[in-house]
Image: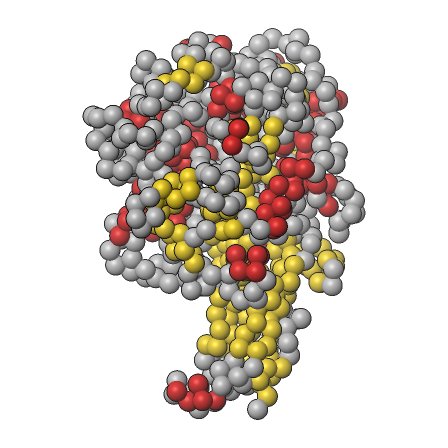
Amino acid sequence: MYRLARCGVVSLFALALLPLRGQTPVVGNPTDSPFKNQDYQKPQNCLPCHQRQFDELRSSVKSGYRNVSPLFNGLEMSANLLNGGLLRPVYADSTKTLTLADGTIIPFTTNMFSTDLFVNVNQVRAGFCLGCHNGPLMKEADTDPTKREVPEISTGGKFVPELIRPLRDYHLIDNAGKQVLPAEIGGDPPAGSGPSLGAAGITCDMCHNLQGPNFDRSFQGDGFANNSILYNHTIEKVGPFARVVAPKDNFHIGSDNADKIAFLRSGAFCNACHDVRVPLAAPGNLQHAEHDINTGGQGVVYYRLENLSSEWQLGAYNSTNNPFGKVIRCQDCHMSTFPYGGTSNYEVGDLKITSPTPAIFADNYAAVPGVSTDNNFPLQMRKVVNHHFTGVDVPLLYPEELRARLGADYPDPYQPGVDEYGVPNSLAERRQELLSAAARVNLDKTDKVAQLGQTFTVRAECVALTGHRFPAGFSQERTAYVQLSVTDDNGFLVYQSGYVVDKPHPETGEMQPDGNLNDEDLEHVHATVDPGNHNRDPTKPYPAGMTSNAGHTNQVFEAGPDDGPDSRVYFGINEGLVLFRNELTKIFGPGQGVGRKDASGNPIVATKPHYEETFSAALANTVDNFRSLQPLVPRTFKYDITLPTQEELTELGITAIKAPLHVHAQINYEHFPPLFVRFLTRTTGPTGPTGHNLNLLSEQRIDDLLKNLTNLASADITVNVQE
């Protein structure tokens, strides 16, 4: 389905053109730390003194699961399989060129971990994903080959898809601490193996070893995106407090540097990873691409995949112009007792809101009394943060798989009980409550009277209460929508939107409907996605004109029966689905091929600017943020609903509509849209570009573990029916 680039497309780039208010972090680039060097530490080394923080971090998705996630590994694999391996980890002494299947030679010059200033797009690509998922370890390993876990995957500098393994295969060690690999690519961990340091993901040192922002590593010199942090691998650890008590045996030293402490406590600290800016391959063809403003960096061309930090920086919560009258930092929602710290009442526009209160912190010790200091030196009770980092994800791994890859003590994401503050231990329950605080819907502006054969209008007013747009991230990960129904007093369904239908999914082996609606896509679009294999014989060269970055296209992409987003956004039609998402998009200019052929077998070439959704970040070149909700800015979505005439009711065997009509609206949330997960299942499966199964995703995993959330917020109203 082609989507013409009308004037609304200007909104795609608006964020790129706006100055970020207060975007410069609170410190400059500090000098190197004068303290003794210390290897990057595993979280267990911090456990004796920081039991509470360790337990909280283990029950988040940031520590451990983030690096062994089948979704992360699948997305990273898919991007590499469709892009010639340009996002693979590459180190300072690696081959300085990469040869694609068509013979094209790509120079690297240096890489993402050793460079101080990005001047070439390939510097950004090398190790792109691990830059945030395991940045400090990768930086340290850049200069010490013995600490490398993920090697450069190439043969003579040439990317070979058939040899590729998921990154998580490299995060396993035996009892002697030696790296071991699964016998089968992507398979189960070897017996007796355990997690390596790399499997720990985002660990204590990734935050507490900071020196400050690294402006040279950020494309626009602002400290945003792609792990733009200076790290300090020494015994100096930066915490939220100054003048801390010396830990037992002087394992580390608490920093007294006021600038570093202020940076850690600020929202600016989160900017380095929670914007994601993806390098692009063809700067000459992309007029809408963004360019680095750093001196010498004009060769770095990119698009914004995620804008969480930019959205927060530009939004009301980074000011006093919000219901709480003070700056609400990222930490105030994701590291406080929120959403369990009480409620607040306020107004947004004409909406009356009750929601959880951010920035409520518990009183506790920063370390374990009697354990963490020499001679039982007393500790001070303080307002402390928690380390749950609750977000919107739950693991798509079974509990036994989590323990096999992350250690026997790794907690069940659905474990019962609460902690000492009354906060649920269950990651899934915390996620549910966090999302329930994210948005509200109201129907009060709906027409109060309807008439048979006539049109009446339902008005669903929605508002996001988040610190960034809702949903955040890109659409293939995060989608929310309004489920709307209109029924009469007997339950006769007059209208519905935002619904799913139980269907088979033969592309991933589900031949019959299974009774599970969590694995179903909304009925607004039907798509068939090419996984990129093209029946290729892996022993033979790629077909003429095809390289390893030309495998995946959108073969079929058409409107479904509940279509709504395009017609609502671009044509002003008040019907169909109300969808909140940040759409991963490919924009084609005139003369560019779209990667498909017409009915006559001729390549389709764009004759005018147009765009279409894509399922791979590797193929996208922009993200459409128009459909997601801006924080604290209510939007009213109209549904023009025509009631049947009496003659039509009679034909249906219905005597009359029984008044009143009941209008119900609720906001639902998709963990991962099933279509996207099935795309990754096929791309990394036996029919994908490698020609073998990477053992990451399957229909069974989707059916068992993909749990979407319904009724995050709801509203009801009745409408009278006139004769």
Question: Measuring 60% from the left and 44% from the top, which residue is drawn there?
Answer: 12
- Residue 517 placement, left or right of 661: left
48 vs 145: above or below:
below
Where the C terminus falls, by quadrant?
bottom right
Locate residue 531, reporting x and y percent. Answer: 32, 40
Between 97 and 138, the one nearer to me in the picture? 97
Residue 274 in which image quadrant: top right
460 vs 366: above or below:
below
Locate residue 521, reporting x and y percent. Answer: 41, 56
- Residue 260 placement, left or right of 250: right
Question: Measuring 64% from the left and 76% from the top, which residue is drawn there?
Answer: 447
Locate residue 506, reporting x and y percent. Answer: 26, 52
Residue 36 in which image quadrant: top right
Res. 48 in view: no
Res. 295 in view: yes
633 vs 371: above or below:
below
Question: Measuring 66% from the left and 50% from the top, which residue is drawn there?
Answer: 631
